[in-house]
Image: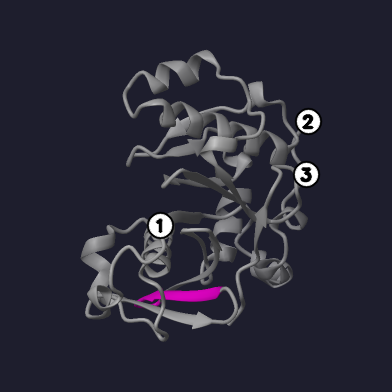
Amino acid sequence: MSRPEIAWIDKPDEPGEAVVWLLRLAALPPLAPARSEDMIDSAHGGGPGRLTRRRVARTLLAARNGRHPDTVKLDRTVEGGLKPALESDGFISISERHGWIAVAHARQMIGVDIERAGDAETSELDAMAPASEDLDFGLRWAALEAFSKLMGTGLIPELERTRLAFTPPDHLVASLGERKAGLRFRRVGEIFAAAALDINRQLANLRRRANFPPDIDRGITRCAFTPASSCLPPPQP
């Protein structure tokens, strides 16, 4: 089974097809300035973190797509999460917890989550979401949350059918029926961050995002596990 190519980055313009920018809220780097639409959105509640999430997301999307931050527009999903307004800007997922924020970006759907290490006994999850190894509760919960964000499922109703398998040193595979996701995780101090990519649907996402013709699979199967940017048509002038 292919491992997910998810890179943990320290700067938003570092290379990688799928990346996670993990930042401590108390030591944020320079971010894109807030625009009027950011201020309007943050006025709907959620505290200062709502505005910070927008600024971090716009900074990352601008660097990753070679755009000025002022040209990056964000919308809200049906569930209320942030998403790029332009399909060509890819997908994002955001988690802000325990003094940290993680923003994941990819050309296909991606999920990310942050949890505190050892917040509870792992036995509390054993009956609900069995794992192949004795994994820290925080790691298991971060992986399950990232997987649920990726798949668009409600976490609690699907827990009993979700399975986790560990591959050292930092890979997991989450499965829910026939749906599988590859995860990478990182521990920094007291927190775990986990990010998930869909293993089974990479070609489907590429086809949908680029509007490829039905015979895509005849000549472009190689794109399933190579950088999607090498398979996408050039942007229109």
**Quadrant assignment for the C terminus:** top right
Compared with residue 65, is residue 169 higher up or lower down, i.e. above or below?
below
Left or right, residue 202 beside residue 83: right
Question: The magenta stretch spans which residues?
Answer: 171-178
- Visible residue check, residue 232: yes
Q: Name the residue under label 1.
A: 115
Q: Mark 2 points at which residue?
A: 237
Cα separation between marks 1 and 2: 43 Å
Q: Mark 3 points at which residue?
A: 234
Residue at the image point whose x is 39% and y is 83% from the top: 134
Q: Give the image location of residue 209, x and y in percent.
A: 59, 49
State the image quarter where residue 213 is shown. bottom right
Question: Is label 3 in a helix, a strand or a loop?
Answer: loop
Question: Is label 1 in a helix, a strand or a loop?
Answer: strand
Residue at the image point whose x is 53% and y is 36% from the top: 26
Question: Is label 2 in a helix, a strand or a loop?
Answer: loop
N-term mark: 1 or 2: 1
**Which marked residue is nearer to the observer: mark 1 or mark 2?**
1
Is residue 206 or residue 147 the one in the foreground?
Answer: 147
Compared with residue 54, is residue 202 higher up or lower down, i.e. above or below?
below
Majority secondary structure of magenta residues: strand
N-term mark: 3 or 1: 1
Compared with residue 233, is residue 71 higher up or lower down, i.e. above or below?
above
Badge number at residue 207: none
Which amino acid type is shown beneath numbered disc 3?
A: Pro
- Counting labels gives 3
Q: Give the image location of residue 69, x and y in percent.
A: 66, 26
**Quadrant assignment for the N terminus:** bottom right
Farthest top residue in view:
36
Cα separation between marks 3 and 2: 9 Å
For the residue carrying disc 1, how many other residues have a C-alpha within 10 Å: few (<14), some (14-19), or many (20+)? many
